Every structure is written in C-alpha cells, then in structure tokens.
Image (spheres, coloured by chain):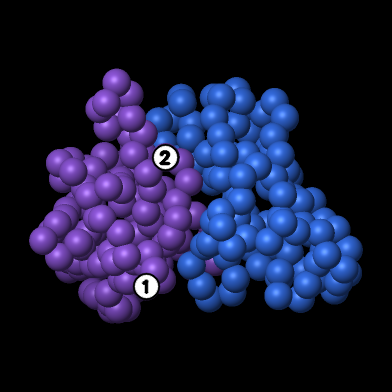
Amino acid sequence: QVQLVQSGSELKKPGASVKVSCKASGYTFTNFAINWVRQAPGQGLEWMGWINTNTGNPTYAPGLTGRFVFSLDTSVSTAYLQIGSLKAEDTAVYYCARAGFLMARGVIVGTWNWFDPWGQGTLVTVSS
Amino acid sequence: QSVLTQPPSVSAAPGQKVTISCSGSRSNIGKNFVCWYQQLPGTAPQLLIYDNDKRPSGIPDRFSGSKSGTSATLGITGLQTGDEADYYCGTWDNSLSLVVFGGGTKLTVL
C-alpha cells in the first residue's frame, strides 16, 4: 500500500542541525510531490512547502527562513527536511505528505492542496 | 491566528449529526477547492474530504463536505466515539501563495 515512513524522534540542542527523512513506498516516487507540514505542541497545522520529485526543485512557504532545506534521493524514494541553527521554537512534529502535481500546459506548476497519505510524523525537540 | 476560521470545539451525542464550519475569504476558499483532515489523538492527519465534497476510498459516507462562497462545512452523521478527534480544513490562498489550514476543531462525542 502507499505509505510514507519517517525517521524517529530527535532531541537536539539549540544551534545544532537535524535531518528528517521520509521514505515512500507503494507508488512511483517521482509521480507525486512531497509536502512538509509542521505542528507545534498543542497547535494546528502549518504548511512549510513542497519539493518537485521530478526536478528536486523546492518551493518554500513565504516567511520560512533559509534554515529549512528540502532535498531528495530518488534512488531510494526518500525526501529529506534539514533544519539548521535549531531554536527552541522549532520544537514540533514534522510531517511529510504526498500530493499530486498541478499541471499547466504539460508543465508542473505546483502541488495539489490536499495531501494523502501523510507520514507518521517526526518529533523534533530542541532543548538545552 | 489562522487564515481559516473554525470553531474550537463541537460536541454531540453518539448517533447524532454534527457540522463543522470553516470560514475564509475570496482569496482562499472563494477561489479554491477545500479539503478536510481528521487527526486522531497522537496520530498523523488523515484526508477525509478533498475538492470540497469528494471522499477518498475507504472514507465512510457518514462524512460529507460542502462549500458555499467563502465558507465550507464538514458534516458527520451517525457519530461514534471513535470519531473523537481534531478536524482541520485546508485550501490554497492565492494572495499569500501558500496552503492554509484552519485552527482545528476538537470533536467530542458525549
């Protein structure tokens, strides 16, 4: 079945970096986009952006700082989220989620705005 | 402060029906499809409704979605205790150029 499996929880100190993985299975990885969504403790969902699995081109939500980087390794059907210079306010569960490509004249111009399925989430805790 | 506005909580008895509203603006719900997610405690969100009123395979027809103007509604009939969860609406916002979510609604089945 289609599923996304994420790496395990991380405990990091402020200033460190972390890399979260999201391994896809059950479908052709490059046929769908991967989106990233975070959820701070007790809070709602916040879309972070998406990555084009055909080209590796990331699109970040406006306001998302350069500390966040999306990447891929298509040879193992895996997407990555790297966060640098971690701060306490980065503490959250980070989800990857699959979405279809939005096409215009045969060109990928975006991602659908609905996501299915989601990974199980990765808790990143930043604490000294 | 979420771009889409949902009631913080709703409640109803088992077997009853409940609706959850999601209010937006012309730049988001007014111009784009709406989706809904269910997030059971301690789990990842699961897609319930997409393109305003479509259900993915495996989602029971007790769940329904609708949209009118700049608002959308999720309906759940035949409530079960297993429906207790947080529910989120989502869509694209043309002005902000990002996917936006509601703040979430906690459903309690009394």
Residue sitting nearer the eye, B54 or A82: B54
Please name the amino acid that badge 2 sits on. Answer: Trp
Taking A103 as reference, is B20 left or right?
Answer: right
Mark 2 — residue? A112
User: Measured along the vertical axis of the image, is residue A118 above or below residue B31?
Assistant: below
Percent position (x, y) of residue A82?
20, 60
Q: Colour of chain A?
A: purple
Percent position (x, y) of residue B110?
85, 74
Regarding mark 2 in the picture, which secondary structure is present there? Answer: loop
Residue A91 appears in the rendering: no
Which of the marked residues, 1 or 2, is nearer the chain's N terminus?
2
Measure how far apart labels 1 and 2 are at the Cα level: 25 Å
Q: Residue at x 48, y 67 (%)?
A: B44
Q: Residues within 10 Å of mark 1 (few under 14, many from 20)?
A: many
Q: Which dot, 1 or 2, sits closer to the camera? A: 2
Are the numbered discs 1 and 2 placed on the same chain, yes or no? yes
Percent position (x, y) of residue B14?
86, 71
Query: Chain letter for blue?
Result: B
Residue B105 appears in the rendering: yes
Residue sitting nearer the eye, B101 or A99: A99
Mark 1 — residue? A123
User: Measured along the vertical axis of the image, is residue B18 above or below residue A23?
Assistant: above
- Dot 1 falls on which chain? A
Q: Residue at x 37, y 54 (%)?
A: A98
The quadrant in which the N terminus of chain A is found is bottom left
Taking A81 as reference, is A74 left or right?
Answer: left
Residue A68: assigned label: none
Please name the amino acid that badge 1 sits on. Answer: Leu
Q: Residue at x 53, y 76 (%)?
A: B42
- Dot 2 falls on which chain? A
